[in-house]
Image (cartoon, grey):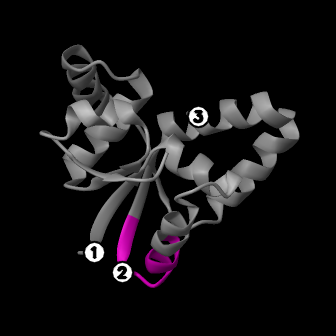
Amino acid sequence: MPEAFVLDSFALLVYFHDEPGSQRIEDLLRRALNGEVALLLNVVNYGEILYQRERRGGLPAVQRATAIIDNLPIEVVEVGRDLTFAAAHLKARHPIAYADAFAAALAARESAAVVTGDPEFATLEGEIRVEWLPR
């Protein structure tokens, strides 16, 4: 089974905006295409990306983002009861955004690293692996 990485909204927005760290995301995407790694994005973080894109560029930006994400080698993971409970548990114990708790819960469940530059994840480093992108 290939090594798994959870992409949070920070990681994909870095990729969309060609910001520092986008090369690492491009590398992970290439490796995922080759079957070397698995990339995961939960549907809550997907929604977070979409609302941020809509704020910047309206519905056309959402449509472009959806078309791009849906054609990338990323598995979009639905959020069920178990993942919701795990995210709520993390949120109750750490000062993180609720959407970030879903990325962390998915990483814990899949023994994956979260790829992010969001400093809120620092409080979770004892519970999950974090691969830091530049800020």
Range shown magenta: 29-38
Q: Amino acid at mark 2?
A: Glu
Residue positioned 61% across, 57% down in the render: 15
Q: Amino acid at mark 1?
A: Pro
Residue positioned 79% across, 51% down in the render: 64
Tag 3's secondary structure?
helix
Disc 3 or 2, which lies upstream in sequence?
2
Q: Quick check: 64 left or right of 16?
A: right
- The answer to which image quadrant residue 84 occupies is top left
- Residue 117: x percent and y percent? 44, 44
Q: Is residue 80 visible?
A: no
- Residue contact between numbered discs 1 and 2, judged by CB atoms under 8 Å: yes
Q: Quick check: 30 left or right of 80?
A: right
Q: Residue furthest bottom?
A: 34
- Residue 67: x percent and y percent? 73, 56
Q: How many residues crowd around disc 2 within 10 Å: few (fewer than 14), some, or many (20 or more)?
A: some
Tag 1's secondary structure?
loop
Q: Amino acid at mark 3?
A: Gly
- The answer to which image quadrant residue 94 occupies is top left
Q: Which residue is mark 2?
A: 36
**Residue 2, label in figure:** 1
- Marker count (numbered): 3
Cα gap from disc 1 to disc 3, whole angstroms: 26 Å
**Residue 56, label in figure:** none
Cα gap from disc 3 to disc 2, whole angstroms: 27 Å
Residue positioned 80% across, 46% down in the render: 63
The correct choice, above or below, for 52 with respect to 117 in the image is: above
Cα gap from disc 1 to disc 2, whole angstroms: 6 Å
Tag 2's secondary structure?
loop
- The answer to which image quadrant residue 3 occupies is bottom left
